[in-house]
Image (cartoon, rainbow, N blue to C red):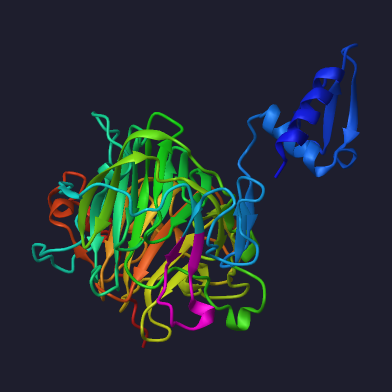
Amino acid sequence: MIAPEEINVLLAFFAQNSILLERKKEPHIKILGHQESCRPAPLSILDDKLKEAAQTLFPVKTELRYQSGFGNYFESEALVGSLPKNQNSPQKHPMGLYPEQLSGSAFTVARAENRRTWFYKIRPSVVHGRFSAVSVPLWKTVGIEPVMSPEQLRWDPCPEPTKPVDFIHSFFTLVRNGSPESRSGVAVHIYSASQSMTDSYAYDADGELLIVPEKGTLLIKTECGDLSVEPCEIVCIPRGMKFQVQLRESWARGYVCENFGEPFRLPTLGLIGANGLADPRHFLIPHAAFEDQSGKFDLFARYQGNLFKTALDRSPLDVVAWHGNYTPYKYDLRLFQPVNTVRLDHPDPSIFTVMTSPSVTPGLANCDFVIFPPRWMVAQDTFRPPYFHRNIMSEWMGLIKGRYDAKEKGFVPGGSSLHNCMSPHGPDAETAEKAIQATSAPQFLDNTLAIMFESCYPYRVSEAAQKTPLLQKDYLDCWRDLKVMFQPRA
């Protein structure tokens, strides 16, 4: 950190030379002097203290920067010298910050599974008012739901809100299984928000939040820093981490998987080898950024299936520095490297798994996050759409863009479908007919991105999702025209 006397020397230097430093995207600094001349100068000509002073004295807006690597151990400081180097909890921090640890796993789990981050905060999290319950009837993850048949279901997209509503208050639970108490299962919500979270923050003690935007860019501010996420990207906020969601457009819509079970991780690749699917280096983690703000703020807490609120007199995003491996992250689904058949037959959809949350049974997922991205289809003499199927796993699906290759109509971006345990499903009649008659020429599936949350636990459909007018009453009709083509031979 620059000492006060050094700052005075640098200020005098700037004043004497009338220099304005402006950081550009290119790796150089423009130096503007008395004669308005401009010449590039390498950053190497400025020592670290001068560069730090330039950024402090002449701040400029820059794009968010990220660190990369799924599950890596990171460290970041917003102010030089704010991160202790030799210990986690010094007796007296040089900047008067409070050390606070956020543990995402038990202390005694294996080191490879241990998740925790040390924060260096302006004030500890324990400073808050009393909690009071907040009613959010459409965000439902506990309690009894009306009995639902094994019928296949499909929903239209949520419309734009008619009244102002922020991210967490717009949750509409479609399906769920397991429970926060058992630390197993997931809940799938849709959000449709029309305003940013202003003067309010939240955390979820029940599970991590995997957010999949379908419409509108979000700026997600967390204790570890800020992330910008747009449609075709995802962001995951760990269980217990405070955050705030700001809209970058007038309206935002998308999907949320609230994961009560083990945190999402990358699947093992087995015989695929060392490369393929989601590359660990494409997962981005924020740099430290903090808010030093006093005022009146609300903190919402999701706990045991209920929402609570407490009052704060300072922003809770006051982490000046941190180190650890329990962090939020974002990932661009367009970077996924799909693996597909190169000769015959349609492979199982598990080859499109981006991340998985394991259950206690090896190979049986609490939740697999699967995508169906643009890709080549080259299988010869093969029925190329997803095959007709009955599955012990339960499948919820959403659509981010374009058209899903198993459905010609009815399944649109922002919509959802559910095929529960052992409920038959597959391409609709129109898609099946086209696939049977098609040639075996290579075909590139473009303008498509579907997602799936597949779970070993059957989904319960919320009462609101059963009664909403968004539920399509005629979904079963899409298979009605499948023909009987059986021709027995002597």
Q: Is residue 338 magenta?
A: no
Total marks drawn?
Answer: 0
Depth check: 9 or 253 in front? 9
Give, as a single range, the part of the protein colored magenta. 100-118
**Do we see residue 337 in this rendering?**
no
Question: From the viewer's perspective, is 166 left or right of 212?
Answer: left
* Magenta stretch: includes residue 104: yes
Q: Give the image quarter of residue 206.
A: bottom left
Q: Quadrant of residue 100?
A: bottom left
Residue 469, given in percent of the width and then of the height, sits at: 16, 44
Image position of 397 (left or right of 33) = left
Q: Quadrant of residue 93?
A: bottom right
The residue positioned 67% from the left and 72% from the top of the image is 275
Q: Which residue is rendered at x = 24% and y = 54% of the image?
A: 173
Vertical position of residue 354 compared to residue 331: above or below: below
Identify whether 39 is placed above or below 206. above
Give the camera-side residue of 17 and 369: 17
Image quarter (top left, top right, bottom left or bottom right) of the C terminus: bottom left
